[in-house]
Amino acid sequence: KGWKNNNLLTNDDIIECVKNPSKVKDKKQYLESLAKVQSCIHEYGELLVHHENESMNSYLFNTLNNLLTPDSGSHARVLVMKVIKGLGGIDGFGEIVHSKEEIKWMRINRGMSANTTVSLPDPFVWIESKEAYEQVCGAVRSCATQSTKQTVQLEKLKPNELKHDLLMAGFFSQVALDSDIFDKGIESLRKWAHTKITEKYEKILCDWICNRCPGFNLHIDTSSVSGMCQYQVGLNLALWAITKPDTWLFSLFYGDSSIHKDSFLISIPNDEFAEVVKASGRVGWYICPNGHKYSVGQCTMPMQKARCPACGSQIGGSNHVNVQGVKRLGDNDIKGDPDKGYSLENNETECIRLPTLSGRFLRYLLHTGLLISSCISENNRKIIGELIMPDKKIDTIEVLSKRLKQDWKKMKHLSNLGDGDLALALHMAIREFREGTAVSRGMVIRDTATRDREEAKLSSIINRYFSDSKLKAKIQNTREQLEDANSTSAIRLTTGEKLWYEIHEEQFSGNESPDLESLLWRYREPVSFNGFKQYWGLQPLDIKSKFSLLRTLLKEEERLPAIRGVRDILAWHSILFEVIPHMSLTRTDAIDITNNDIISKLPKERQNNAREVLSR
């Protein structure tokens, strides 16, 4: 990020890029200016998509403002909107278009955006069939929108044969998401459901949904696209859990939360020290007299003395002998399993044993289950609060909501998808979970082997979806199948037909032959090293194992600039080997020799050059 601060975009670039490309004489200058302008537009569009509490107009610096005026033509303004749609999806684009804050350069009919609410494609048609779901929604709405106790349409559903997760989905989409429902209608709906549902947990969930899911929206803004997506995905996971009784998944949402302290919860990292040991390679591990851990490299045995950075006690040793009180750790001393329960102090900590994105999804699943469990049960809320932070009294729902939002933000970053597209991709994965994923029986995961198997089942599906190079096309196809036509129409009316046509680049999909200028201003996702790293990070382990050189290169990429120092290191080593004959120095002798001692043994006329080599 630096166009604004470094002033790399100039007015000369703007003047150049608005010229007719077929008539410019200096094509190189034109293309350079166009590249700078479009790079700036991509960055600006990304800032708009990911804005949170900041004013969207605050991103508009003077040079960019000049670019987006009517005098500079429409191509730049249209490209910004293409970038917003490309990065944020149609839902993110709609949220910005319908925002209360007017973006100065955006020429849209804001009168058409009044009172528009967030509307997302409805994934619950996948629970059984579109026909069955629409029948449930129609019957639920028929009851809920009347002030009299009308349950005739509900009885026609043959409630004894009705899948309860399908019924709850109908309650959610028709009651929880609509604020214009009669209270009497909701109450008669709730009472009718209680006569048909026998399980206590289903009655509790039914009441929570009929009350519009209190607690979930306390700290998550469900009036925004991001909040509504988290709301919808959370309910989809909760409805999946209903179908898996007597499993750890069910207990996460509906069980007695006191049992979690005896369970190896999904996505909780293994013992942090064991992860450090695994990542450190060939080193020896020791503990100081006061129990602080440290490592010794090279031969892994002590050859010099030092002070413990944590407590100041003497550590190390000499000639492979430890100082008194220091102990070397063996394999049995290095713990590999995490503590049972929620042993996660910092939600930023990644689970190293899992691919980053699927690990973050499993963390999202964990937090969603704990949050909904806290919302529907006061007793569970208290237990979960003590589980998360046993030594501190917390607002459980606030802490879990914050962590849930962190998980969502991480998934967006890792997948490079907008809120709506990410939600649809997760709904597609949850659909596959429902259809073909067997969840291990037992309300508690009693060992890490079982936990790893359960994680692997879900992780493999998530990895397959998000590493698919055609994912965005599949999301678009799914959206078209599920799309609520009203939400798209509202955005289309706001932009107008001509602008809508240009944003979607429909001239490139028809028989029309676009001109050169339109071709040069097409939207394309920028190709970048960071983009490739994101794509690589989504690949399953079996794919990465086939490209060991590439895997190592990307793993060590941040350290690669150090290669430029190899020449200087070898130059100094050349001096060392010249002064010290082969095998003429013991380890003990080497401890006492300094670099200045080495330089002093060279001829005087070469000492200054040696100091210069050492100082590089």
Image (spheres, grey):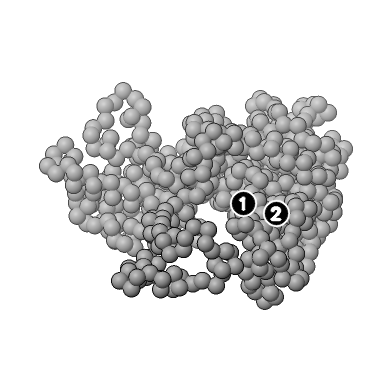
Which of these two is toward me, 205 or 134?
Answer: 205
Q: How crowded is mark 1: few (under 14 residues within 10 Å), some or many (20 or more)?
A: few
Q: Which residue is drawn at 70% across and 40% down?
A: 455
- What element does badge 1 sit on? loop
**Residue 145 percent location from the top left of the image:** 68, 41
**Residue 228 percent location from the top left of the image:** 60, 47
Q: Is residue 130 left or right of residue 66?
A: right
Tally of numbered tags: 2
Q: Is residue 500 visible?
A: yes
Q: Name the residue under label 2.
A: 274
Q: Can residue 257 be seen in this view?
A: no
**Disc 1 + disc 2, Cβ < 8 Å:** no
Task: Tell me the quadrant of the picture where the N terminus can be found.
Answer: bottom left
Task: Kindly give the residue lying farthest to the top in the view shown.
Answer: 511
* Res 281 label: 1
* Res 110 label: none
Q: Which residue is drawn at 64% across and 35% down?
A: 460
In terms of sequence position, does the residue under pointer 1 or pointer 2 come before the other? 2
Q: Which residue is drawn at 52% across and 41% down?
A: 551
Foreground tag (1 vs 2): 1
The CA distance from mark 1 to mark 2 is 12 Å
Residue type for callout 2: Ala
Residue type for callout 1: Gly
- What element does badge 2 sit on? helix
Which of these two is toward me, 329 or 19?
Answer: 329
